[in-house]
Image (cartoon, grey):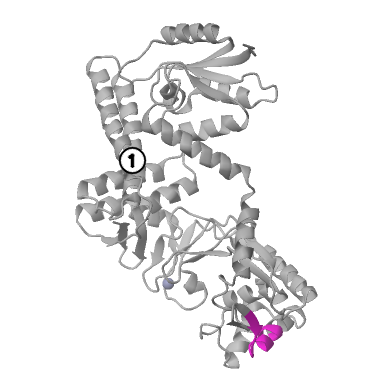
């Protein structure tokens, strides 16, 4: 039997979330024995001992080990642990790190569990394989191929853009094609801006595809749509299911392919138009609508539009504020409000609205895939963990601070699991008042934390709140929770 000697490192961690805890020395000893028996060269040992409070989250030893694994020298072929649960603290972590290590050819070996244990382990393996597959293909190319295929079969072209009529799964220029040509001509050759083009079309009684009047946005949409030079664009925007809630996707996610329909605009004109739009963008970046965690959730009480967030303008000495976008378009009397005030009212109002039963529920869509079994299992494990840390505290193993920190971690995990359970069960259960309150408080904790970025805060908020309707006059916020 030929033997290639593998260089490995050990990772040792102790925590209170295990009933049967092996001391660091015993873990080290067992790993050494295992390495000798299997012909591994143990070249380094990384440790995270004494999990307490903040350091529990950081795991300096673990991070150092991962950094070394990723290094060019590739010092280790495997990481040896006593138990898989030493390596990762939860399923997500396990999946993320194992998948990453797998890609760089580093194995994770548990000396007491040769095969990953239980349903959790099997699930992890399954997900790892799916992730490997996911990463090994060039996603956008795959999607594009699928879509082009779909287009050939005529599956995608349902609604034609302005200027075209759809017939037998093909676009044909119609009487509005001339309006499209006029729009591009006004914009590129005659020096009209978006607003004045909209104004002119409205004056002449020309309607949009949906039969409404023109505005900046609709003109811009036409000018930026490559369908007019014979291309098809997919994945441009995400429709959230509710009318009027369309968000434009990142430009990098757009998929543009050659179509088979007749162009209305020549490439040269289209290119000039894009250059001019790009210039506009540069000129109007002075007052950028920057994303706030309430963006998209906070809604104008007068017209229902999502309030736009404007960060502070140092030149004009204005504090950050929210304003209804329709006010700036002259179509809504809603006033602008300091973000600071809105945040204050939000934090006060969220818990109060639940306590006084003064809130609304928005029904969420049902999700087809049911993975509730696995989540329920993790929930019961979560319960046990809580029992164990209580036990550790009662027996004087953990200090009160350690207990509190561990309890917080476990509760956070529980909330995460509960929110997943809600999403995956086919008939969503309404949260009880206590659950709502708990959720509100933990959401607020995230929103007020300095350690979370805007995106994490926005995600946390969206997991609970569908929308918040704000009236400046009355100072009243109406909360719509996802039920
Ligand atoms: Zn408004």
Q: Is residue 450 found left or right of 376 in the rendered image?
A: right
Give coordinates of residue 114: x percent, y percent.
45, 20
Residue at 48% across, 27% down: 58
Give coordinates of residue 74: x percent, y percent.
66, 22
Q: Is residue 466 found left or right of 98 in the rendered image?
A: left
Which residue is label 1 attached to?
375
Q: Nearer the viewer, residue 355 or 208?
A: 208
Q: Is residue 41 above or below residue 177?
A: above
Q: Quadrant of the N terminus?
A: top right
Residue bounds of the magenta highlight: 171-182
Residue at 40% across, 46% down: 447
Residue at 59% across, 92% down: 203
Q: How many neighbours does mark 1 have within 10 angstroms: few (below 14), some (14-19), or many (20 or more)? A: some
Q: Nearer the viewer, residue 433 or 280?
A: 433
Q: Is residue 400 above or below residue 369?
A: above
Q: How many marks?
A: 1
Give coordinates of residue 340: x percent, y percent.
42, 54
- Residue closest to the far front: 1
Ligand 1 falls in which quarter? bottom left
- Residue closest to the far right: 268
Q: Quadrant of the C terminus?
A: bottom left
Taking the magenta stretch, the answer to whether it contains residue 181 is yes
* Residue 263 figure quarter: bottom right
Q: Nearer the viewer, residue 153 or 174?
A: 153
Give coordinates of residue 291: x percent, y percent.
51, 55
Taking the magenta stretch, the answer to whether it contains residue 313 is no
């Amino acid at each position: 039997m030929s033997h290639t000697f593998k260089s490995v490192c050990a990772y040792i961690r102790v925590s209170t979330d295990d009933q049967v805890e092996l001391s660091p020395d015993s873990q080290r000893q067992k790993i050494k024995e295992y390495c000798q028996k299997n012909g591994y060269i143990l070249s380094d040992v990384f440790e995270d001992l004494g999990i307490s409070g903040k350091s529990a989250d950081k795991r300096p030893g673990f991070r150092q080990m991962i950094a070394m694994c990723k290094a060019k020298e590739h010092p280790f072929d495997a990481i040896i642990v006593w138990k898989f649960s030493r390596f990762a603290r939860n399923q997500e972590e396990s999946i993320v790190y194992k998948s990453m290590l797998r890609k760089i050819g580093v194995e994770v070996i548990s000396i007491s569990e040769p095969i990953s244990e239980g349903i959790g382990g099997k699930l992890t393996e399954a997900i790892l394989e799916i992730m490997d597959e996911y990463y090994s293909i060039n996603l956008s190319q795959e999607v594009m191929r699928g879509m082009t295929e779909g287009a050939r079969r005529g599956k995608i072209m349902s609604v034609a853009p302005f200027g075209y009529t759809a017939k037998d799964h093909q676009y044909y220029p119609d009487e509005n094609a001339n309006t499209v040509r006029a729009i591009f001509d006004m914009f590129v050759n005659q020096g009209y801006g978006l607003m004045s083009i909209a104004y002119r079309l409205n004056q002449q009684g020309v309607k949009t595809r949906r039969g409404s009047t023109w505005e900046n946005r609709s003109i811009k949409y036409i000018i930026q749509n490559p369908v007019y030079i014979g291309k098809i664009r997919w994945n441009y925007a995400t429709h959230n299911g509710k009318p009027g809630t369309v968000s434009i996707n990142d430009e990098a996610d757009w998929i543009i392919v050659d179509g088979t329909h007749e162009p209305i605009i020549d490439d040269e004109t289209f290119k000039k138009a894009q250059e001019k739009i790009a210039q506009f963008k540069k000129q109007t970046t002075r007052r950028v609508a920057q994303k706030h965690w309430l963006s998209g959730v906070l809604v104008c009480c007068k017209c229902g539009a999502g309030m736009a967030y404007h960060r502070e303008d140092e030149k004009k000495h204005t504090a950050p504020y929210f304003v209804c976008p329709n006010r700036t378009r002259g179509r809504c009397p809603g006033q602008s409000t300091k973000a600071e005030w809105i945040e204050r009212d939000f934090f006060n109002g969220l818990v109060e609205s639940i306590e006084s039963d003064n809130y609304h529920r928005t029904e969420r869509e049902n999700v087809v895939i049911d993975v509730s079994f696995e989540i329920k299992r993790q929930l019961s494990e979560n319960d046990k963990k809580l029992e164990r840390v209580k036990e550790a505290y009662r027996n004087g193993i953990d200090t009160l601070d350690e207990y509190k920190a561990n309890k917080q971690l476990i509760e956070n995990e529980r909330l995460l699991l509960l929110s997943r359970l809600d999403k995956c069960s086919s008939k969503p259960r309404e949260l009880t008042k206590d659950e709502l309150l708990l959720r509100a408080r933990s959401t607020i904790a995230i929103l007020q934390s300095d350690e979370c970025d805007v995106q994490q805060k926005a995600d946390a908020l969206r997991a609970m709140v569908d929308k918040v309707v704000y009236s400046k006059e009355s100072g009243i916020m109406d909360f719509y929770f996802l039920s």
